């Protein structure tokens, strides 16, 4: 039997396409063709991330104050997910996945999805994503009609995947208009 709907939120004017929640925080964001809406699910408020046409934006939940841009994902961002370890992943129209540290905004990894045989390269877009309950596997829903399950690289360490703080700091200090 189906569960009972606890609440219906009707503030969007166009179809709602996505939903993102931080597992450590009690708020969520819904995305539609017209805008993003922030919803408070509990009096305990922290922050949330919204995807835009060329970057991610981090906001304070309590009053909607802008905190920072997470730049570098240069495509339309359709989906994002955060696990309990503070790993934020964003997925774009061009099939790119970017992994970020939620607290600092440091982009530490980029991966491009591969479309299934018989699909066009233009069908590489990522439309939705979520981490599983362990937080170590990412599930993506893609334009090529596939659901993909991504696992973390268990052999990765500081030597095989060094952090380039100098380049990241330089990128963060570049003047940009938002």
Image (cartoon, rainbow, N blue to C red):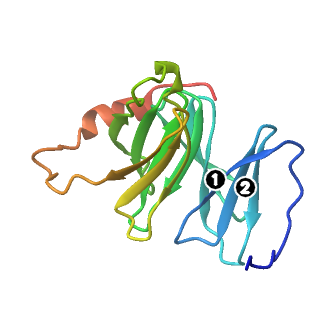
Residue drawn at (78%, 37%) of the image = 33
Residue drawn at (73%, 80%) of the image = 1
For the image shown, how many numbered marks are present on the structure? 2
Callout 1 secondary element:
strand
Callout 2 secondary element:
loop
The furthest residue to the left: 159
Residue 166 as seen in the image, left or right of residue 29:
left
The percent coordinates of residue 47 (x first, y second) are 60, 61
Q: Nearer the viewer, residue 93 or 161?
A: 93
How crowded is the residue under tag 1: few (<14 C-alpha within 10 Å), some, or many (20+)? some
Residue 107 as seen in the image, left or right of residue 82:
left
Residue, disc 2:
64
- The Cα atoms of the two marked residues, 1 and 2, are separated by 6 Å
Q: Return the disc, 1 or 2, that comes first in the chain's sequence.
A: 1
Q: Are marks 1 and 2 in contact (CB under 8 Å)?
A: yes
Q: Quadrant of residue 42?
A: bottom right
Q: Nearer the viewer, residue 29 or 63?
A: 29
Q: Nearer the viewer, residue 16 or 72?
A: 16
Up the image or down, 47 lies above or below 91; here it is below
Residue, disc 1:
59
The percent coordinates of residue 44 (x first, y second) are 66, 77
Q: Quadrant of residue 87?
A: bottom left
The percent coordinates of residue 56 (x first, y second) are 56, 41
């Amino acid at each position: 039997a189906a569960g009972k709907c606890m609440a219906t939120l009707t503030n969007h004017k166009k179809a709602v396409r996505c939903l993102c929640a931080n597992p450590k925080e009690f708020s969520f964001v819904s995305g539609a063709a017209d805008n993003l809406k922030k919803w408070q699910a509990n009096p305990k408020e922290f922050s949330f991330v919204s995807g835009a046409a060329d970057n991610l934006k981090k906001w304070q939940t309590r009053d909607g104050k802008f905190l920072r841009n997470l730049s570098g994902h240069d495509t339309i961002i359709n989906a994002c997910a955060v696990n309990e370890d503070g790993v934020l992943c964003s997925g774009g129209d061009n099939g790119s996945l970017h992994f970020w540290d939620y607290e600092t905004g440091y982009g530490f990894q980029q991966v491009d999805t591969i479309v299934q045989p018989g699909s066009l390269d233009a069908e590489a877009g990522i439309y939705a994503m979520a981490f599983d309950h362990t937080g170590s596997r990412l599930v993506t829903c893609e334009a090529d009609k596939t659901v993909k399950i991504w696992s973390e690289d268990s052999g990765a360490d500081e030597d095989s995947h060094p952090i380039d703080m100098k380049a990241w700091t330089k990128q963060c200090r570049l003047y940009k208009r938002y």
